[in-house]
Amino acid sequence: MPVYVEEMTSEVAVFEGELPLTEAQIEKLVKLVLRRLEEKQREVRHIREATVLRREAAPPLLVGE
């Protein structure tokens, strides 16, 4: 069953000094975030293109000319 969360609160602890993630983990996380942002932008473009009002569906067909 899908669950949709409108708002979420999270507690984060910050430690001074070294990051708790390795460079490889950080790189993987950054790539994941960038990929998700690109997917969201693609989805927004798709929705906009699907709902755009056009003057005509195809070029006019000139009959008898």
Image: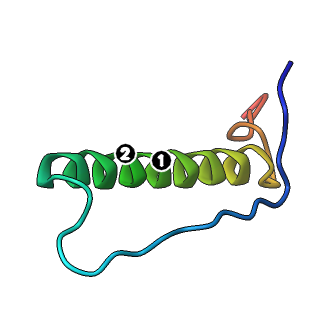
Residue occupying image coordinates x 50% and y 44%: 39
Residue found farthest to the left: 23
With 5 as the anchor, is 30 left or right in this view? left
Foreground label between 2 and 1:
2
Element carrying mark 2: helix
Residue found farthest to the top: 1
Q: Position of residue 45 (x, y in %)?
A: 60, 53
From the viewer's side, name the closer residue of 64 and 4: 4
- Disc 1 residue type? Arg
> What crowding class fits label 1: few (fewer than 14 Cα within 10 Å), some (14-19), or many (20 or more)?
few
Q: Position of residue 35 (x, y in %)?
A: 39, 46
With 30 as the anchor, is 58 left or right in this view? right
Q: Position of residue 42 (x, y in %)?
A: 53, 47
Looking at the picture, the colour scheme in use is: rainbow
With 63 as the anchor, is 43 left or right in this view? left
Residue 63 position (above or below residue 16): above
Question: Which residue is identified by label 2?
Answer: 32
Q: Label 1 near label 2: C-beta < 8 Å?
A: yes
- Disc 2 residue type? Leu
With 13 as the anchor, is 45 left or right in this view? right
The circle drawn on residue 36 is: 1
